[in-house]
Image: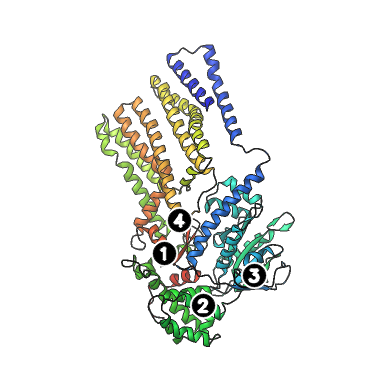
Amino acid sequence: MLAGVLLLASAGYAVSQLVRDELGPADTAGLLGLPIGVAGLVAAVAALRRPAQGTDTELVRQWAATLAVQVQESEGKVRHQLLGRDTRRIDLRYTLRAVPGRAAEAPGVGRTFRDPGGAGADPDIAGFFRATRPRRLVIAGAPGSGKTVLALELALALAADRTDTDPVPVRIPMAQWDTAHTLPELLEKHLTQALDWPAEMARRLVSHGMVLPVLDGLDEMDPPLADGSPDPDAPRAKAAVQHLNAYQKGLEAGSLVLTSRMANYEALLAREPLVDAALVVVSPVASETALTYLRDRCHDQARWQPLLDHLEAHPSCVHARTLSTPWRLGLTATVYRYHGDPADLLTLYDSGALDRHLLARYIPAAVEPAAGDPGPPLYGPTQVHRWLHHLTGHLTGTGATAHQTTDITVHGLWPSAGPGRVRMADALLTFGTISAVLPAAWLTPEPGKAAASVLALAVVCGLAAALALSPSRLDWQKRHKPGLRGPFLLGLIVNPVLATFVGVAAGLAVGVAIAAAGHPSASLVVGTVVSWVAGLGAGFRFSVATGLRGAAPTTAVVPPVALRDDTVYGLVYAVSTGLFGGLAVGGTVALILEPSTGLVVGAATAVASGQASGLSAARRYLVFLLCARRRLPFRLGRFLDWACSAGLMRYSGPAYQFRHAELQHWLAAHPDPVVSP
């Protein structure tokens, strides 16, 4: 810090001597020594920020502990959403299935969790995984059988009961995997983009083997055939399995967990099997367990009794077989939670008809407020159905990616409202915002030149806005992280000093250009203004970015937090860039022409630079909402959060997902509500 202050004082003295033309030989030597001093300061700061030798392993283990807490927080929320407004869990059973070729050694059977009062010897999912050698596990089953729930339980159990050397389980939806990248690259990308880890920390966590990949949904990587059966070629799934076979730690196969529908995995076994892995198949929910779950969830025993009696008396009937998965049990409990006659299911004798019957009534039941909630429903069932149907179109490969996916990020939804339409509206909004400064041009001595400058700036920025990329998010909560305040405040002092001297080059270039344009008297002053203002602005921005990005995340990244932090990040960058950019340009114009013109041009520059640097994502999101008013609610984030609380959707890092793939497919196929089976 002291070195920075001394360098700042030296620079001020040098500028004053230049203005007075009193620079002597000693002063010249001092001025030439400034770059050396700056280089020394940079080296000193870099040395202070470099971790001590021999502590790399300890640092990575500390980061892994933070990641484990983050996983428990985020995945705990997802599990609660999957349970559907309830805390009742189903103890799923699974059995080891023999596969051709090399397979891992594992226990023969297992369960989700141990019954505290039971005496069963079957291991729970965490114990089953730890007993598997090598630790490569495939969880397969029928649609809705609870594969994701079982993977969640495994991730939560491993994260809660780990030693310093154990890897942290991180669940990743496989639909988002660009198979041009390897599995370690996927892990690093997920840590940085979904969990908000700095890139260097993510790379070191992965390279040290402190991340256990839990890959959810191999069956969701490729679309099915026209008849609904799995594609035996499945190019993306096949490429993913090839990456998994190549994944290893040292001389052993790398630990991982994979979930897939059984039919899809069987289709791959003959062509691209996953080697050194144990395959377990989730068993149907036992009749007694299903009955216990429904009795615990129903609020009116008399209304449910006919269905319960039938299921108890006929444990092998089509109704019992259909209601033998956690998804359909939860669906039934929600549909008939407060109203309707569950015995209506007994009039249907086909599993497909039962599914259609339940799915058609699921949204109206989910929209209904819980018993005791005051006031009417927040949204109508018809609105909710149509809004969710529109969102499914973004997941079929027509949005930001060329393949189908499961994640909905609010800042990535804008192509669904028409890419050309949104880009044009974004350009017009940018043009109009900057052009708002135009009336002030008529207060200047030369309104034509001032207006032309503002309009030119508005046109250029409007065209640039049509192609603007969304800036990355910032975890504003990191400012409270212990040990960060000191380095952050030091950066606010050191970085502007460093940036100021770097800005001298820009100032000299501007000064030379001004002198060549016929204003030699103003060249030195203009160059000084540009270098100082631009340097201070760049230094402040750099301090905010590095200070808040350089630490591990403090909270789980959920969509509301991501959207809020994007806005805060955008405002900070917009204000800093707009302020310093407007001062630099406006001050230059004021010195060359006159103050009022400089004020107008500076104000337009401030608005333009602020929008371009910090608010492009928020502006694009606002334009998207305006363009999608007839198909989506204007307060989209509020609606999606409500849908998660209602059990229709769930969080997936900073993105949203439909609660179940069956619900997503149903909504995609039905633009309007279906009131009868």
Of the numbered discs in the image, which one, if any, rests on residue 95? none
Q: Nearer the viewer, mark 1 or mark 2?
A: 2
Badge 4 is on which residue? 559
Q: Tell me where residue 217 sits by quadrant.
A: bottom right
N-term mark: 2 or 4 = 2
From the viewer's perspective, tell me whether residue 45 is left or right of residue 20: right
Distance in Å between CA atoms under marks 1 and 4 = 13 Å
- Dot 3 falls on a residue whose secondary structure is helix
Residue occupying the point 66% across, 42% down: 55
What label sits on residue 292 in the rendered view? 2
In the image, residue 457 above or below residue 309? above
The quadrant of the picture occupied by the C terminus is bottom left
Q: Position of residue 531 (x, y in %)?
A: 45, 28
Residue 145 quadrant: bottom right
Counting residues from the N terminus, which is met first, the one under dot 3 or under dot 2?
Answer: 3
Q: Which residue is mark 3?
A: 268
Q: State the residue in front, 278 or 117.
A: 117
The kind of residue on which mark 4 rests is: Pro
How many residues crowd around disc 2 within 10 Å: few (fewer than 14), some, or many (20 or more)?
few
Give percent across and percent down for residue 646.
42, 66
Work out how far the residue at label 3 is from the one at label 2, CA to CA, in angstroms: 37 Å
Nearer the camera: disc 1 or disc 3: 1
Taking depth in this image into account, of 78 and 241 the one nearest to the observer is 78
Percent position (x, y) of residue 104? 71, 66
Residue furthest out toward the front: 117
Of 325 and 9, the residue lying toward us? 325
Identify the disc placed on residue 643: 1
Label 3: few (<14), some (14–19) or many (≥20) C-alpha neighbours in 10 Å = many
> Which of the marked residues, 4 or 3, is nearer the chain's N terminus?
3
